[in-house]
């Protein structure tokens, strides 16, 4: 018997495998200070695996800045971001690249390369960041284009696609790196409502597939229907966090009430 007894013990432990952690991403007392202005002012937030969180709040409340700390597009001034239970501050650059791959992000502006086709946009990072062969990257790209309903657009440049299609290509591109967490920063704000719906439907399917997601959004219907939890931010702080039915229908905080009256 060549089995290492220690190894054996680990497999015998009952319940969930030990490698499976309940918390996918976590902010611990995160502060982002821009020249004396705290855009994020002491945020504690745990994102459970498979959880969908909608981040709402007035413009300037720190939603984008907070999202960006989760993949270190923005370094926290103090506090800590943990991904998969591992602290990410003070990480080496190599670790940071690995981290960014675990945390995919989609922005309001789709940021596709205009001179590349939809498929090439999706292939690029797979080849450069994951070292996949062009053939593998292409196969995965086509699979994801199909998933977002755009298999016929593979060879089209972004300019010949609608805004909703471009955002779906951007989602496919982020998914191609097999992220564990997906962050969305107002992914439909730049879109006409009918095109936003296409994007929201793709996000809804992604949520139903079990993806861990945090979505800064003004789409209260999406927050209510899809999110497991709604977080209201104001002045860089979380003022309220809870089930959509509570935060959106029976908010406790006056700031939340005022915000919802203005947007609904
Ligand atoms: P939201 O996404 O909720 O609209 P942001 O995170 O974009 O809020 O901004 C929060 C605050 O931080 C705002 O006051 C904004 O002007 C400020 N801010 C955001 N990014 C920067 C930056 N790079 N430099 C200086 N101030 C910034
Ligand atoms: Mg923002």
Image: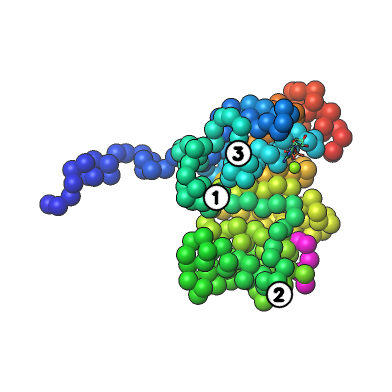
Residue 72 as seen in the image, left or right of residue 60: left
Mark 2 vs 3, N-terminal side: 3
Mark 2 vs 1, N-terminal side: 1
Q: Would residue 42 be visible to someone looking at this image?
A: yes
Q: Would residue 246 be visible to someone looking at this image?
A: no
Find residue 31 and report its image quarter: top right
Q: Give the range drawn in magenta.
A: 160-164
Residue located 78% across and 66% down the image: 162
Q: Distance between the residues labelled 2 and 3?
A: 36 Å
Residue named by callout 2 = 156
Residue named by callout 3 = 75
Q: Along the line of sight, which residue is nearer the eye, 264 or 5?
A: 5
Which quadrant would the C terminus be assigned to in this image? Answer: top right
Residue 50 as seen in the image, left or right of residue 68: left
Is 163 colored magenta in this rendering?
Answer: yes
Mark 1 vs 3, N-terminal side: 3
Badge 2 density bin: few <14, some 14–19, many ≥20, Cα 10 Å = some
**Disc 1, SS:** helix
Question: Whole-percent x and y of residue 259?
Answer: 82, 32
* Nearest to viewer (mark 1 / mark 3): 3
- Judge whether 68 appears above or below 79 on screen: below
* Nearest to viewer (mark 2 / mark 1): 1
Badge 1 density bin: few <14, some 14–19, many ≥20, Cα 10 Å = some
Residue located 60% across and 39% down the image: 75
Residue 142 as seen in the image, left or right of residue 38: left
Is 90 colored magenta in this rendering?
Answer: no
Residue named by callout 1 = 100
Residues at circles 2 and 3 in contact by the CB criterion of under 8 Å: no
**Disc 2, SS:** loop
Find residue 195 and report its image quarter: bottom right
Magenta span dominant secondary structure: helix
Residue located 78% across and 28% down the image: 256
């Amino acid at each position: 018997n060549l089995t290492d007894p220690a190894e054996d013990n680990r497999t015998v432990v009952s319940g969930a495998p030990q490698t499976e952690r309940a918390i996918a991403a976590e902010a611990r007392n995160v502060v982002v200070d821009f020249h004396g202005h705290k855009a994020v002012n002491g945020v504690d937030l745990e994102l459970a695996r498979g959880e969908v969180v909608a981040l709402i709040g007035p413009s300037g409340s720190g939603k984008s800045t907070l999202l960006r700390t989760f993949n270190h597009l923005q370094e926290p001034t103090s506090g800590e971001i943990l991904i998969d239970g591992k602290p990410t501050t003070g990480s080496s650059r190599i670790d940071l690249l690995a981290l960014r791959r675990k945390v995919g992000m989609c922005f309001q502006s789709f940021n596709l390369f205009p001179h590349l086709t939809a498929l090439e946009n999706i292939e690029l990072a797979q080849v450069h960041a994951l070292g996949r062969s062009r053939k593998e990257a292409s196969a995965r790209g086509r699979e994801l284009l199909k998933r977002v309903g755009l298999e016929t657009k593979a060879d089209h440049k972004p300019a010949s696609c609608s805004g909703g299609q471009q955002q779906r290509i951007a989602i496919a591109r982020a998914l191609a790196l097999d992220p564990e967490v997906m962050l969305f920063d107002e992914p439909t704000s730049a879109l006409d409502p009918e095109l936003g719906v296409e994007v929201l439907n793709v996000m809804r399917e992604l949520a139903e597939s079990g993806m861990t997601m945090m979505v800064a959004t003004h789409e209260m219907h999406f927050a209510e229907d899809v999110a497991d939890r709604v977080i209201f931010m104001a002045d860089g702080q979380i003022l309220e966090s809870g089930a959509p039915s509570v935060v959106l229908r029976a908010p406790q905080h006056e700031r939340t009430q005022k915000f919802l009256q203005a947007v609904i």
